[in-house]
Image: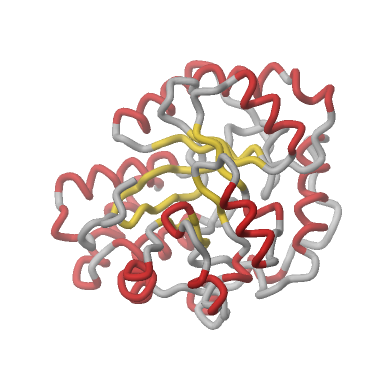
Amino acid sequence: MNTNTINYFLPEFYGNFKMITTLHDMMDAHPERFYDNIKIAAAYGCFPGNIWNGGRVIIGSAAKEDIEYAVKEYNDRGIAVRFTFTNPMIENFHLLDTYCNLCMRLAHNGKNEVLVNSPLLEKFLRDNYPKYKYISSTTKCITGYDDIEKELEKDYYLVVLDSAMNNTDELFRLPHKEKIELIANHYCADNCPKRRYHYEEVGKAQLEYSRINFKACENITRSFEQIKSNRSFISAGDIFGRYKEAGFVNFKLDGRGFKKEKVTESFLYYMVRPEYIKEVSELITGAYL
């Protein structure tokens, strides 16, 4: 992995397909509009209706041809498709789900990635789809320094930390910084005590093709400007400054299930030079209208 390049991981590869591919193509055609040494390394999410999906409930379905098309378009641009197969409620009989296995087979080309949480599902996937890069998910809610160190020693391509670690002295003391992925703009509240419970309830709802049965977290409705007051928020200046200097180069942008306008705002903030924001915003917006 190039430690001189900031790798961004963007939300919802299926729902935001046009926006992400348009952004990538603009970066190729007009690099002067964007910050130096940045890359869309992967787009994360799931195809609608994947029961292994976690983090957000995504209902629906996609045809085989649509899956093949999306994977090819991303991979041809050098962007990995990253499945969020982090549902913590998986049982043995869920492992044989035809649709989820179809998605894994169609992207099993050595270019793509999977976020994992459930040990049961992780073992099944590693045994059957060894060409993927496997990534430890933030949905594990690992916050203890010693436990994070142990996770970093395991056979993961990357480890996505709980945002509770952001902007702490402990974070900068961790080893294997090149293997750490940080959520720059997490909308969840700092140190939310219900995070694990919410992930479990989302997992149950995804398995049942149902709505979540708890009141949606009010933090998700906050604006991008409002979340800048979070202790866990990592500014663009800090990414290109003290974080990169310390060896952190992997940053996930939150935004699955959000309105496209909110997602666009975060893309512009982290990737586009201020003098080009209006111009790039109009082009990205045109991609999804």
**Scheme by which the image is coloured:** secondary structure
Asked if residue 24 is positioned above or below residue 138 in the image, the reply reads: above
Horizontal side of 134 relative to 236 (left or right) equals right
**Quarter of the figure that contains the N terminus:** top left
Can I make out residue 58 in this image? no
The answer to whether residue 43 is left or right of residue 223 is left
Residue shown at the point (29%, 45%) measured from the top left: 24
Q: Quadrant of residue 164?
A: bottom right
Work out which residue is located at the far bottom of the displayed protein and give it: 229
Q: Quadrant of residue 206?
A: top right
Q: Position of residue 89 (x, y in %)?
A: 82, 40
Numbered-mark total: 0
Above or below for 92 versus 260: above
* Residue 281 in sight here: yes
Q: Residue at x 48, y 77 (%)?
A: 225
**In the rendered image, the vertical position of residue 4 relative to residue 59, given as above or below:** below
- Please state the horizontal and vertical placement of residue 255, each as a whole percent of the image: 53, 56
Left or right, residue 85 beside residue 22: right
Residue 103 is situated, as x and y percent measured from the top left of the image, at 57, 23
Q: Residue at x 70, y 24 (%)?
A: 124
At x 54%, y 83%, the residue is: 229
Query: Which residue occupies the foreground of this view, 179 or 163?
Result: 179
Q: Position of residue 267 (x, y in %)?
A: 38, 60
Q: Is residue 210 left or right of residue 144?
A: right
